[in-house]
């Protein structure tokens, strides 16, 4: 059976899987990312996944950045033991196989385009909104990686040249307004504190996926795609057919969740990481974690719950973040004519709290017809999108050589 080896590398977790051409998972495994000796842990993980299974034909890797495709090196911000680490060469030496490398958010976009919410669209922007904001572009079915592999850094597009100074050194970056920690920081600075019962208040699940369309009667993606479930039940059968560990793209399946390649990302905000440094909760900013009152944690989870309950400042924080995202989406659509935007990451689990103001903001800032026609959807693969994208990266490379 033909298959490729897909690898997803982040600051908290290493995941690997054998994936066939239809997107079915044949074998998979995961393990925590160690502070040191990461390559040794990755080598053991690869040996575990490939032992006794069909021989893969190529390797696709999605890794937290920054990275340099010219040299095949990576320097993930939350993996201090890897600075200029020659990941592509090391995996090639280990496996003897053609090895492809891309950023984690780029693999998120590619996975959603192949088997997720962007399936069938011509051009896609994938956005990961969590501790930071990352992105990836898929144009005419192929990932747009850029000369060094860093294309798609939409979190550091400036939506206000006179705006706040970003941690990256730029000014007015989207991430400064719309990431989980930065929305929380703004809310705290403006007098918000988490309600005492925030931990017991559920984030509503209505309107989890929206469509921004030039046609006012077009309705939402829920109308067009069925019930709008984030479990990937809109016919994403190949990637959902995990023959060993349960579904990767469509719910839990029969296998134990912890045995799946990314099975610990279940509830809202619970994945922590939907591919890489933008979504890795391991390095959550300190200001997001400030305790407010007895046992209450001031973070994006509490902010979303309070916004859903109508807290004025919490609502304003999400509206402010959504408007920044809308400006970035409209600008990217105008520059690259993307037809679909897929949003994942822990903050996207806020559902209508994020997507409703985003839809309103897009209605306001988008002008040209092809920009107004962009569809905005929530990720259906979630934390699984990175492995799907890494696998597709390898399959595309194989097809280009035949």
Image (cartoon, grey):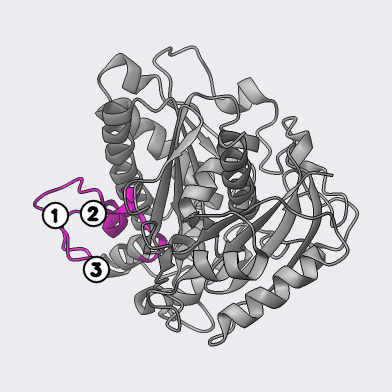
Residue at the location (63% across, 65% down)?
200
Please, what secondary structure does the residue beneath circle 3 have?
loop
Relative to 295, is 125 on the left or the right?
left
Kind of element beneath mark 1: loop
On screen, residue 258 above or below 358? below
| Image side of residue 345 versus residue 315, left or right | right
Q: Nearer the viewer, mark 2 or mark 1?
A: 2
Magenta range is 153-181
Foreground mark, 3 or 1, reads 3
Q: Does residue 117 appear in the picture of this structure?
A: no
Please tell me how crowded label 3 is: few (under 14), some (14-19), or many (20+) other residues with Cα within 10 Å: few
Residue hosting label 1: 163
Chief SS of the magenta region:
loop
CB under 8 Å between discs 2 and 1: yes
| Foreground residue among 360 and 368 | 368
Residue behind mark 2: 173
Q: Position of residue 116 (x, y in %)?
A: 63, 37
Q: Nearer the viewer, residue 122 or 49?
A: 49
Residue drawn where x is 60% and y is 30% of the image: 119
Q: Is residue 179 magenta?
A: yes
The dot on residue 167 is 3
Place of residue 220 in the rendered image (x, y in percent of width and height, measured from the top left): 54, 24
Front-lying residue, 382 or 153: 153
Q: Residues within 10 Å of mark 2 (few under 14, many from 20)?
A: many
239 or 228, nearer to the observer: 239
Q: Secondary structure at mark 2?
A: loop
Q: Are marks 3 and 1 in contact (CB under 8 Å)?
A: no
> Is residue 353 shown in magenta?
no
Dot 1: within a 10 Å radius of its alpha carbon, few (fewer than 14), some, or many (20 or more) residues?
some
**Horizontal side, residue 48 vs residue 61: left or right:** right
| Quarter location, residue 290 | bottom left
């Amino acid at each position: 059976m033909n298959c490729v080896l897909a690898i997803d590398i982040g600051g908290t977790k290493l995941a690997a899987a054998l994936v066939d051409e239809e997107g079915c998972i044949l074998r998979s495994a995961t393990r925590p990312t160690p502070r040191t000796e990461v390559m040794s842990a990755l080598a053991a993980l690869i040996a575990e996944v490939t032992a006794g299974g069909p021989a893969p034909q190529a390797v696709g890797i999605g890794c937290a950045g920054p990275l340099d495709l010219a040299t095949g090196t990576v320097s993930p911000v939350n993996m201090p033991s890897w600075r200029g680490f020659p990941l592509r060469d090391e995996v090639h030496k280990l496996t003897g196989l053609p090895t492809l490398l891309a950023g984690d958010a780029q693999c998120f976009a590619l996975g959603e385009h192949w088997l997720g919410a962007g399936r069938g669209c011509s051009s896609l922007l994938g956005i990961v909104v969590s501790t930071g904001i990352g992105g990836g572009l898929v144009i005419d079915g192929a990932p747009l990686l850029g000369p060094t592999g860093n294309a798609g850094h939409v979190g550091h597009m400036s939506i206000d040249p006179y705006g706040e100074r970003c941690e990256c050194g730029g000014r007015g970056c989207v991430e400064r307004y719309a990431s989980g920690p930065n929305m929380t920081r703004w809310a705290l600075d403006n007098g918000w504190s988490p309600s005492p019962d925030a931990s017991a208040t559920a984030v509503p699940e209505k309107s989890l996926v929206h469509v921004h369309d030039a046609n006012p009667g077009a309705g939402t993606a829920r109308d067009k795609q069925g019930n709008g479930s984030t479990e990937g039940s809109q016919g994403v059968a190949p990637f959902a057919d995990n023959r060993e560990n349960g579904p990767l793209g469509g719910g839990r399946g029969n296998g134990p969740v912890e045995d799946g390649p990314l099975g610990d990302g279940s509830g809202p905000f619970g994945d922590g990481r939907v591919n890489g440094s933008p979504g890795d909760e391991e390095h959550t900013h300190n200001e997001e974690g400030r305790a407010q009152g007895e046992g209450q944690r001031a973070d994006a989870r509490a902010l979303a719950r309070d916004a859903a309950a109508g807290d004025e400042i919490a609502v304003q924080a999400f509206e402010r973040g959504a408007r920044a995202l809308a400006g970035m989406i409209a600008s990217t659509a105008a520059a690259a004519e993307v037809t679909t935007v897929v949003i994942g990451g822990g903050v996207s689990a806020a559902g209508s709290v994020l997507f409703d103001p985003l839809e309103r903001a897009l209605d306001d800032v988008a002008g040209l017809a092809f920009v107004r026609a962009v569809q905005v959807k929530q990720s259906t693969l979630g934390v699984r999108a990175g492995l799907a994208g890494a696998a597709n990266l390898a399959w595309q490379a194989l097809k280009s050589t035949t």
